[in-house]
Amino acid sequence: MNNRRSFIRHTATLLGAFALHQNLLEAFPLQTDSAQVGHPDEDFWRQIRAAYAASPNITNLNNGGVSPTPRATMDALDYYNRMCSEAPSHYMWRILDADREPLRNNLAQLAGVSPLEIAINRNATESLNTIIFGLNLKAGDEIVLSKYDYPNMINAWKQRALRDGVKLVWVDLELPSTDETYLVKAFTEKFTDKTKLVHITHIINWNGQILPAAKIADVAHARNIEVLVDGAHSFALLDYKIPDLHCDYWGTSLHKWLCAPYGTGLMWIKKDKIPGIMPLLGNDKPDGDNIRKFESLGTRSFPTEMAIGYSLDLHNLIGTERKQKRLHFLKNYWMQQVQDVKGIQFYTPIDYAWGCAIGTFGIAGKKPGEIAEKLFTDYKIHAVSIEWEKVTGVRVTPNVYTMEQDLDKLVRAIHEIATT
């Protein structure tokens, strides 16, 4: 009981901090000019940084892989773990299991869809693999996908090709690109009468390239082709609702831009498509229309699920539009200051419509691994080296707790590395 009272007092303190943030929202209203958003709001973003336990010793610029959770989320996770440990089967199955429904409703509201269409699971890989393996496909059916898709999804499709004889038709993109006509055509010119589905990665993880998913989907649907969108890097970052993508299936990870606990994800299937997808794990009604058939995971981490709501609260407080503009500003903030560095190459568009948060760069004559290692060893900047298809560089990904001074250190490091 004392632990619970302590948690309630601590939560009240956090809510007081959120109230302060709300005052800041009023003091620093969202600006409509995306090019100006960022610097004028620095006081607001310092308050947001305080909501995270960001390391003062390491500059974390690999938030594209997995983001840290807010302090409130960490505290909630600890609280729910302790609660469940007191009487696991009671608190897990009789209390927290029922609380998944309010969470489902809140996530559905952010996604702009019906709660009857979303399943809560562990990550984008589980979401998209469930769909990939659940689709009713036969030998000779064609799937259009890109060589820049995420490896776990590519491997799932290769497994279906090996097991069922479906044909994989590869799109070979020239990136970065801001040419919508080219990007749409690169996919749609691969369509044939045998094409059953097109797999679109909304934001490519290797370089942050945004693809025109809705435009590709429109052409696909005109030819009776279904559309699967990998939203792992776009959800809670780009200001959109799932229906805006005009897709049939969609999946994401919540531990990226929503900053939810690690190992949380979301799957969406259009209501009339649910019966046609078999669940990855067994269910008593595998051909039913209840989205919950995809949540038959057995014993799971209920505390992890329940803590998602605290990250969702902070995200909603910031607002997706404000977050997108801030992270676009941060991406361009460092990229524009190093664009004249000798030998530098960008794999990410600077244009607002085609890139956000993720920025990947290379330096002629230097290997990505060497650059990333030097960034950490000499400057304590954590980024990730990328060598995939035609991308050979270092990926830099700030988040809402990243300050301009953090990126100033990155800019200085790139200048010095390029000249040594």
Image (tube, grey):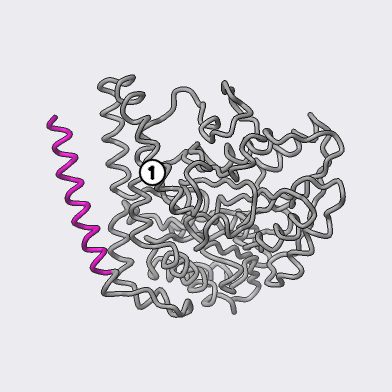
In the picture, the quarter occupied by the C terminus is bottom right
Q: Is residue 15 magenta?
A: yes
Q: Which residue is mark 1?
A: 308
Percent position (x, y) of residue 83? 26, 28
Residue 236 visible in the shown view: yes
Q: Which residues are magenta?
A: 1-24
Percent position (x, y) of residue 198? 74, 50
Q: Name the residue: 86% across, 46% down.
A: 194
In the image, residue 98 sits, relative to residue 366, either above or below, namely above
Q: Name the residue: 39% across, 70% down.
A: 404
- Please indicate whether residue 279 sits to the left or right of residue 337 in the image: right
Percent position (x, y) of residue 129? 64, 37
- Please indicate whether residue 212 sits to the left or right of residue 65 in the image: right
Which one is nearer the viewer's eye here, 344 or 190? 190
Type of amino acid under label 1: Ile
In the image, residue 129 sits, relative to residue 147, either above or below, namely above
Q: Is residue 283 magenta?
A: no
Instruction: Tell me the chief SS of the magenta region.
Output: helix
Q: Name the residue: 35% across, 38% down.
A: 306
